[in-house]
Amino acid sequence: MNAVFKTFLALLRLPGYPGMALAMFLAGIASSFAVPYTSLFGATEAHMTPVRLGIFMTLTAISSVIVSTYLGRVADRRADKKRIVVLSIAGAAMGYALLCVTRNYVLLTIFGCVFLSIGAAVFPQLFTFGKARLHAAGIENTELPMATLRTTLSCAWVFGPAIGAIVLGVSGFNGLFLSAAGAFAVAGVIVMLMREPKVYDTADSADATSSEIPPQGKNAHVYAALAAFTLIGMGSTIAMIMLPVLIVDQLHGTTAHVAQMVGLGAFAEIPMMLMLGGAAQRINKANMIAFASMSHIVYFAGIALAPNLWVLVPLQILNAVVVAVTSCLGMSYFQELIPGALARATTLFFNTMRTGSVMAGVASGFVAATWGYRAVFVFCVLLASTASALLFAFNYQRGAKLFNNAPAEPDEPDEPETTVIVMTEQVETAP
């Protein structure tokens, strides 16, 4: 516990880290307020038909992928990355605020495709900005700080949706979306008040004349990773959509049981992410992610065969493993696959999950309507199996073990903690 506490204090002393953590937490709270209830808003408040709601959600998701990818390319060409972060946060705040002023379908679709699409770049740009700041300050080992930032986002999602439900019940959708817009606005002010580092790590800066993925990244490994993470995101989204229905309709549970399952999984992710952040330098990321995808196979198969509600409880730990590993190591994995394009690699990682979400809605609806709810999770077993096979087959460090062999140094066991603290002291003594 003492080592963990010292490491935590060292993280707080990192340049700009407390502000980044607070901005990440506020943005996470804002998204956890609004995202779970956007489809409900369309169906009940804007009176969209199922077809119109599907078109609205799909167009918004597709435009989010396009716009966030473009902003990632712009961020890699610019030294002033903070402006892109502020722009994306402003887009999210404006988008949710505008949802309060009209119920017209065409206008809502325009607001979603323009402002919410810009806002979709908030998290990849925040993570990019945070890592770039740490590199500019001379901190090379950023795995643990970035893992704790990701944990901050998970903490927001542990209780954010429940608080959002309370706000929705008290003040309606206008109050909910205005609260989300306000939280985004405060996060934007915090980022604006942070200093822009004068020099970024050149390893994370792409050629200013190029808007394409660098040549090092144009290989089968990148495309395999894109396909695998899209399948993982697709399976996760299908489970998020269909598990509540299965619990209530097939296993005779209640909405309280659904909330308990979601809360247990989110709570279990937090310590896993912190452990992964501390050990990330020793882990072969490709193999670890592939093994996590295998956990998804067991998770989906267990749901498909579950005879009662309580079998689902331990299965949530397996899902937490997948979420923790892919979200904590996934960004670094893409950044290693595409060197010299920090913002684009981070954006690609987030876009795989978003693309998987788009595909999940259509696929889950078709399978459920044709073969039933349990068949949906059998389909997810196939998705997870394919993702795991791709990751193992295209592991760019072929033959690597799950844990890399560390150099034989006397002080190796203390390296993760020492690295963070020493780097912090160097920054504080600099003029």
Image (cartoon, helix red, strand yellow):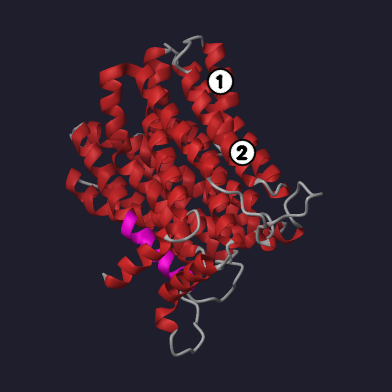
Where's residue 413, x and y in %? Answer: 40, 82
Query: Badge 2 is on which residue?
Result: 68
The amino acid sitting under disc 2 is: Ser
Q: Is residue 253 above or below residue 80?
A: above
Q: Is residue 29 visible?
A: yes
Residue 111 marker: 1
Q: Residue furthest right?
A: 209
Picture quadrant of residue 178: top left
Instruction: Inspect the image, locate mark 1, and give the three-letter code of the amino acid beneath it.
Output: Phe
Q: Quadrant of residue 117?
A: top right
Q: Nearer the viewer, residue 310 or 77?
A: 77
Q: How many residues crowd mark 2 within 10 Å: few (<14), some (14–19), many (20+)? A: many
- Part of the protein shown in magenta: 270-281
Of the pair 286 and 365, the residue shown nearer to us = 286
Is disc 1 in contact with disc 2, using a CB cutoff of under 8 Å? no
Question: What residue lies at 35% left-to-right and 20% top-to-bottom?
Answer: 175
Above or below for 192 versus 321: above
Q: Quadrant of the N terminus?
A: bottom left
Q: Earlier in the sequence, mark 1 or mark 2?
A: 2
Q: Nearer the viewer, residue 294 or 305?
A: 294
**What is the secondary structure assignment of the residue under circle 1?**
helix
Give how far across and how far down residue 173 sits, in percent: 36, 19
Residue for point 46% across, 54% down = 17
**Across the whole image, how many numbered discs are drawn on residues?**
2
